[in-house]
Amino acid sequence: AKTIGIIGGGQLGRMLAMAAARLGIRTIILEPQPECPADQVANAQIVAAYDDPEALAELARRCDVVTYEFENVPVSAAELLVQSVPVFPPPKALEVSQDRLVEKRFINACGIPTAPFEAIDSQADLDAALDAFDGIGVLKTRRLGYDGKGQRMFRSPAERREDAFAELGSVPQLLEGLIAFEREISIIAARAQDGTIVCYDPAENIHRNGILHTSTVPAAINESTADQARRAARAILDRLDYVGVIGVEFFVLGDGQLVANEMAPRVHNSGHWTEAACVISQFEQHIRAVAGLCLGDPRRHSDCVMQNLIGDDIEAVPAWLNTPDVLVHLYGKEESRPGRKMGHVTELR
Ligand code: ATP
Ligand code: MG
Ligand code: MG
């Protein structure tokens, strides 16, 4: 491919555009925000809503292939595009990962365990499901949640509330069993157009205030747990006839067994370390896959810790720049706000 369309102009789109540029591939961003992290790097931007039919027609005309940097691209937009230009990952991957209920059913259908779950469409549904879960669980909106938004935890029956369904906006929800995990890991994997799959080493993730704080590689897991993660990723990729990079999050139980949490049909925050510790980053891997090139080697040449720079963390950048062996990556966002992802640093160990 000579030109790749990217739906979404955030930092993930920016990093994809950077990786494409290095391979001599042009990128065109579709993003309604005229100033966005990706517009500083991409070759062009179409400023329009993600589901604007004229903008989509223009994108299809100007690009050889279209991809996306976030999972809430309207499925209708992807399905419109796919009539005139290849769209990778396939629109089905969006459909599955946009709705936590569909996603969990899909993951189970791949033979991968998840937390037990119940669909919740009313407070009465919630009351019944909480009874069945002994009052303990995690309530999540089915759609549009990220960074722990749109969730409420019931860690004990005492935390139960009579208005929890309304508090999350009375939208369709899901109650999940609360998993007593030992740690959290994720795996970044990629599938090429010929079906070849590569997996990066799983990362161990720590969250703060619901937002990813650090990803450490290697994760403190044994080989059989790592193998479960790779097998799960492969099953998901093959079942979707997927092309591109995917991120799959898991809970690790005390006995090393994995329970899948969620998947993201795109490059993933917990894979940012790959740009520092692998020859081929997740971003280049994704570009290679969607462009129809062969995949690169996912091997890790260094141990490392990636740390997100959220909000005021950006003030530590001068100090990070003074630290040897740290790769500093900033997203070019003018204004820092609490909870806003401003950049990340990866320290080699
Ligand atoms: P992301 O920003 O990764 O997309 P999200 O908002 O989609 O996050 P989840 O990944 O579903 O939310 O949950 C956020 C965090 O909450 C998890 O990483 C985990 O720490 C905790 N959590 C979520 N579901 C459960 C569960 N069923 N049992 C225990 N902890 C959970
Ligand atoms: Mg999520
Ligand atoms: Mg998550």
Image: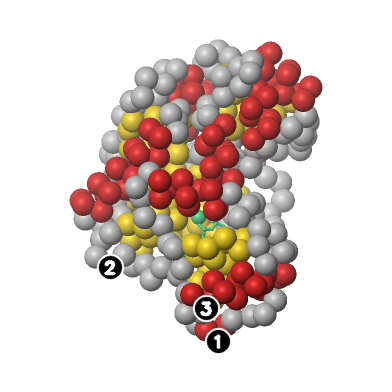
Residue 315 shows in this picture: no
The residue indicated by pointer 2 is: 254
Q: Position of residue 30 (x, y in %)?
A: 70, 29
Give the amino acid type for the residue marked by disc 2 in the picture: Gly
Residue 152: x percent and y percent?
A: 59, 70
Observer-side mark, 2 or 3, equals: 3
> CB atoms at circles 2 and 3 under 8 Å apart?
no
Neighbours of disc 2 within 10 Å: few (<14), some (14-19), many (20+): few
Task: Identify whether 202 is placed above or below 74.
Answer: below
Tag 2, which secondary structure?
A: loop
Residue holding disc 1: 158
Residue where numbered disc 3 is placed: 131
Which amino acid lies under the numbered mark 1 shown in the image of this protein? Ala
* Up/down of 158 relative to 141, above or below: below
Relative to the observer, which residue lies in front, 118 or 256? 118
Residue type at mark 3 is Asp
Mark 1 or 3: in front is 3
Q: Nearer the viewer, residue 213 or 258?
A: 258
Q: Is residue 61 shown above or below 310?
A: above
